[in-house]
Structures are given as structure tokens and as C-alpha cells.
Amino acid sequence: MMQIPAEDLGARWYCVRTQTKREHIAARNLRQLEEVAVICPMLRYRKATRRGKIWWREAMFPGYVLVKFDLASHERAVTYAQGVRGLVRFGTMVPPVPEGFVIRLGEELSGGEGEDKELTLNLTPQIEAGEEVEVAHGPLQGMRGVVSEVLPGRERVRVLLEFLGQVQPIEVDLFSLLMPRRPAP
């Protein structure tokens, strides 16, 4: 569970805009301010590239971090921290983020113990037998087929592709497939 510094009477959570792709820099600089807590939730996933499969990390909310502070006494310091573009405003109003949302977010994410850690959600592709996929990389690029089997522990799947007039079972890397889109739960 996430630990938040001692409550100030006026401290509330706010959404802060950051510079593009600089959420981690803004979070690091905001953490140096006294009486300020920061959450910069991150997504971590594997992606196939020309160099092979690598882990990518990016912000769950691109361009934004959640910051807890007293608006009356810390607005200027937060607004002018390196990497920050400003507070999210609607006209002249700076709406707070509900405390319950931040608590549930912290409970859902792993990897964070205390305000100095970034909360991280590890994403893994979910695919099941019977789903239609398209090969995105390699000599079979662009071909569509149906997953016949997900091979355990090897990040590979067996796909049935029509090739040379027949349906052929072919083993491919899980990360070389374009996954089917699923409706949000």
C-alpha cells in the first residue's frame, strides 16, 4: 500500500501537466519539495523491435502526474518546478482529484512503497486459442490466421495460416503479432 506524508489540513490531490515525455523528471523535481507527495504511475510492457524484445516504460497518464499539496501555500513552487507546464484548470478553478481515486490507483498498481517510488503496472499480452491475429514482423508479415495454441513459457504461439493453398500450423513469437482489439471491461 502506498504511504502518503502526514496530512496537512489543506493538502489535496491535484492533476499537474508535465512537459511531453518528461513525467518522470517533473515527478523527481516535485518530490524534492517539502510537504508535497507525487504519484507518477507507469506502464511496463515488452515490445518487439529490430534490436529484439525490450521492456518499455511509459506514463499511464501521458503528460500528467498526481500531486498532493496545499494549493494556497505551494501552488507557485509546484507550478514552476522543472518539467511542469502547469496545473490542470477549468477557467480559474483548480479541481482536486478525489482521494478515493488515488487510493484505489495505489492499490491496483505494484512496485511502489512510499511516495518516492513510482507505481508500475506490468502489462502482458493476453491471447487465447481461436482469436484471429495478423503477423506484424518477418517474412509472413501481413498474413492473417487463427491462434490454435498458446505455448507455455516460451512467448510463442501456434497460428494456423493459409499458405501455398493449405492451412499450415506455424509457430511465431507472441510479440510479432498484432493482437485483436478487445472491448473495455
Image: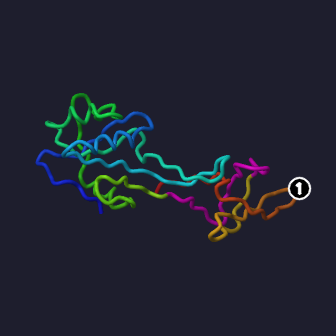
Q: Residue at point 88% right, 57% down?
A: 165
Seen as rendered, the residue at the extreme bottom is 152
- The percent position of residue 39, horizontal first and vertical second, equals 32, 49
Seen as rendered, the residue at the extreme front is 32
- The percent position of residue 96, horizontal first and vertical second, equals 23, 43
User: As rendered, which of 38 and 130 lies closer to the eye?
Assistant: 38
Q: Residue at point 31% right, 52% down?
A: 116
User: As rendered, which of 84 and 104 lies closer to the eye?
Assistant: 84
Q: Check residue 138 for magenta coloring.
A: yes
Horizontally, residue 82 falls left or right of residue 5, namely right
- The percent position of residue 94, horizontal first and vertical second, equals 23, 35
- Near mark 1 (Cα within 10 A), the count class, few <14, some 14-19 or many ≥20, is few
User: Which residues lie in the magenta part?
Assistant: 123-143
Q: Residue at point 28% right, 53% down?
A: 115
Seen as rendered, the residue at the extreme left is 9
Q: Check residue 46 for magenta coloring.
A: no
Horizontally, residue 53 falls left or right of residue 71, namely right
Residue beneath disc 1: 164
Horizontally, residue 139 falls left or right of residue 25, namely right
